[in-house]
Amino acid sequence: MKQKKTVEDYLKTIYLLQKQNSCVRGVHIAVQLGVSKPTVSISLKGLEQEGYLFLDETHEVHLTDTGRKIAEATWERHQTFQALLENLGVDGKTAAADACRMEHAVSPESYRALKKLAKGKKAGDRE
């Protein structure tokens, strides 16, 4: 599981599922991402080896501090991009889909600039 987009999508999905429901299992992730349970199982093993999450004795999925930080940052980027697109007149469904792609593709520098734009600030303004 080396692809940044895949790692971020899994971590964000686990993070959001944990916010909705305290218990997160592989089947919940599979449904949310639209992938098979075996695919999720393989991905979770890779994410666990990389230190982003762990499974407890009941096979419940938990994010580590590192995994949670990545998930929260990815979710924040998603929300920023979605809000920016919706403020530009893009419908919610399209904005959400595009934000999902943008959250992985934009550099930190461009993200900071777009975040300021979304908040109505100019490039030279301080946060």
Image (cartoon, helix red, strand yellow):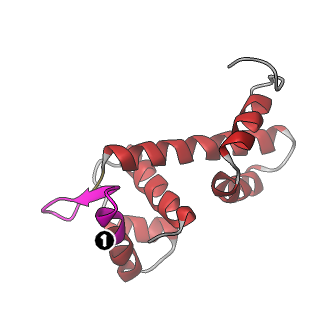
Residue 84: x %, y % from top left? 77, 39
User: Which residue position holds label 1?
Assistant: 45
Residue 88: x %, y % from top left? 86, 41
Q: How many marks?
A: 1
Q: Residue at x 41, y 79 (%)?
A: 39
Q: Amino acid at mark 1?
A: Lys
Q: For residue 104, which quarter of the picture?
A: bottom right
Q: Residue at x 44, y 72 (%)?
A: 1
Residue 60: x %, y % from top left? 23, 60
Q: Residue at x 79, y 45 (%)?
A: 85
Going by the image, does 86 lie left or right of 101? Answer: right
Give the class, few, some or many, for how many residues have Cα within 10 Å of label 1's Cα (few <14, many ≥20).
some
Is residue 47 within the magenta segment? yes
Q: Nearer the viewer, residue 93 or 83?
A: 83
Residue 72: x %, y % from top left? 48, 42
Viewport quadrant of the C terminus: top right
Q: Nearer the viewer, residue 56 or 69?
A: 69
Span shown in magenta: 46-61
